[in-house]
Amino acid sequence: MVELHPTSLDLNQVEPTPQVVNWLRMRASQWLTTAQKDFNAALFARDGSEASFDRYADARSELDSAEAWALRVSEFVAHVR
């Protein structure tokens, strides 16, 4: 099974069944958890090099995206109720 990246989904095209809502919550939670872990690792691994700064910037960007997606999912779920 191919796992979709959350941002590849258009929530306007999703059927809001209980299973879909649960899946969206699970994916948002997984993405947030992974992004936070990667951000923390990048933050504390900074050594002043350009490469470590790039890893930090990439991790910060991914965390921002995960947070934005989680907010969109929460709004979607709120409208379903």
Image: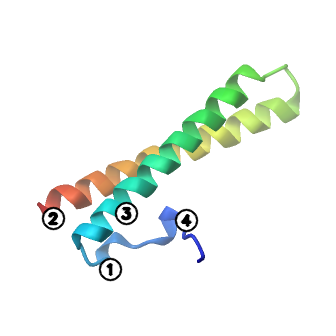
Whole-Å distance between the Cαs marked 3 and 2? 14 Å
Whole-Å distance between the Cαs marked 4 and 3? 12 Å
Whole-Å distance between the Cαs marked 2 and 1? 14 Å
The kind of residue tagged 4 is His
Q: Can residue 13 be seen at all in this image of the molecule?
A: yes
Q: Earlier in the sequence, mark 3 or mark 2?
A: 3
Q: Which residue is mark 2?
A: 80
Mark number displayed over residue 23? 3
Location of residue 2 in the rendering, given as x and y in whole percent from the top left corner: 60, 76
Q: Which residue is mark 1?
A: 13
**Cβ atoms at labels 4 and 3 below 8 Å apart:** no
Residue at the image position 42 percent from the left and 52 percent from the top: 28
Location of residue 45 in the rendering, given as x and y in whole percent from the top left corner: 77, 23
Frontmost of labels 3 and 2 is 3
The kind of residue tagged 3 is Trp
The colour scheme used here is rainbow
